[in-house]
Amino acid sequence: MKITSVELYGYELTYALDHEYVMSKGRAASKQQSSLVRVRTDEGIEGWGESATAGGNYLPTFTGSTRAAIIELASHLVGKDPTNISEIQNTMNSALLGHANAKSAIDIACWDIFGKSVNRPIAQLLGGVLQESFPLYYAIPLKTPSEMAEFARMGISHGIKRFQLKVGGNPYEDAERVRQVIENTPDGTLVIADANGGWNLQAALIACEKMSGLDVYIEQPCRDIADCATVKRNTVMPLILDELINTPADMYKAKYEAGAGSVNLKLGRLGGITPLVRMRNLAQDLDMTFCLEDMWGGDVISAAIAHVSASADPLTFLHSAFYNDWTKEHVAGHEPRSINGVGSIPTGPGLGITINMDAIGKPLAVIND
């Protein structure tokens, strides 16, 4: 089988859960751009992939760079076998250093083709389904304490039992945000205070001291791993690292230098299903819990996350996110779809979803040689 062409599409994803998605450092958006990739083959099998960002001020990537890199990468992939995932990865890494977000869309599309070519869901090709269903979380935007508590109550009414609270502002106000959410949710609710690196060391230490005694995880309190390690040495609250985790070496540093017991692993930050599974397996081997997710996305990204989640070890799996629950636009009929805060994989081969061409319009670019 050979790749005959790569098509790039763009569409907008609107935040559906509230007016605006707000993180620390004033980062806020009501909508984000997403990029879809269709990889066509000489055997008539096609695969779909998706990459999205949370704006250019979250991680060192943005829509323009993602789309330019997809076009550049595609020119090196025409004629390659899409089911030889290792060769596809080597070709992309030889063509461009970095640009993991662009590589992610292509890698997902090739896995979609691989699954369709053998009539198997991707999860089966990743070692098999270890959990038929798995828990999902909601992220609560940075707002006043009472507004965040109300958001949590809304999530509880929809079956959500896991929340990632956006903090990283005034540490005293952040502690009150966490306190009010915990007071307004039932026992057994998992709560994570995620600063997205928004605190400096002093603010992080103050916030943790003010949250002392609360049942809460602290996620990515500072940008620097040494600062995160200092925070962990001064609190008994469990630590999750996210934006700092890009390589196996980062994973070892997270556990043995920073004292983190959990990590967040993102498709677009790592480069697709292939490196995400590699890092997931390393976390499992290190007996670390992990969240599987992305920066943003729609139906295609949610389907890819579902397959990696379903094939994960439930003993170390923390949770994942279906971003198509957070957004209004759906290119595959809002599949996969969560039920009462629980996700599962689509049942068809590959990603198991069907793209509605009327929902995405004409391609932005077609690369066929």
Image: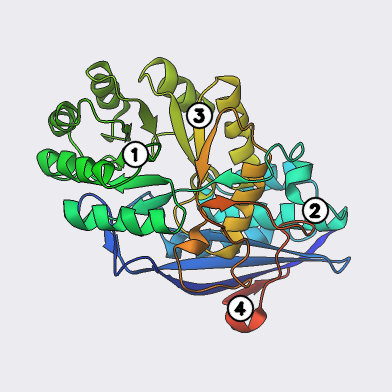
- Determine whether, in the image, residue 209 is placed left or right of residue 339: left
The residue carrying mark 4 is 363
Residue 309 coordinates in the image, percent (x, y) = 61, 43
Residue shown at the point (28%, 35%) measured from the top left: 223
2 vs 1, front mark? 1
Residue shown at the point (35%, 40%) measured from the top left: 191
Q: CA distance from mark 3 to mark 1?
A: 14 Å
The residue carrying mark 1 is 192
Whichever of labels 3 and 1 marks the residue nearer the N terminus, that label is 1
Whichever of labels 3 and 2 marks the residue nearer the N terminus, that label is 2
Residue shown at the point (28%, 26%) measured from the top left: 228
Which residue type does callout 3 highlight? Thr
The residue carrying mark 3 is 289
Q: Dot 1 lies on which element?
A: strand
**Pointer 2 local density, CA inside 10 Å: few below 14, some 14–19, many at least 20:** many
4 vs 1, front mark? 1
Q: CA distance from mark 4 to mark 1?
A: 39 Å
Q: CA distance from mark 4 to mark 2?
A: 24 Å
> Mark 4–mark 3 contact, CB under 8 Å?
no
Which residue type does callout 1 highlight? Ile
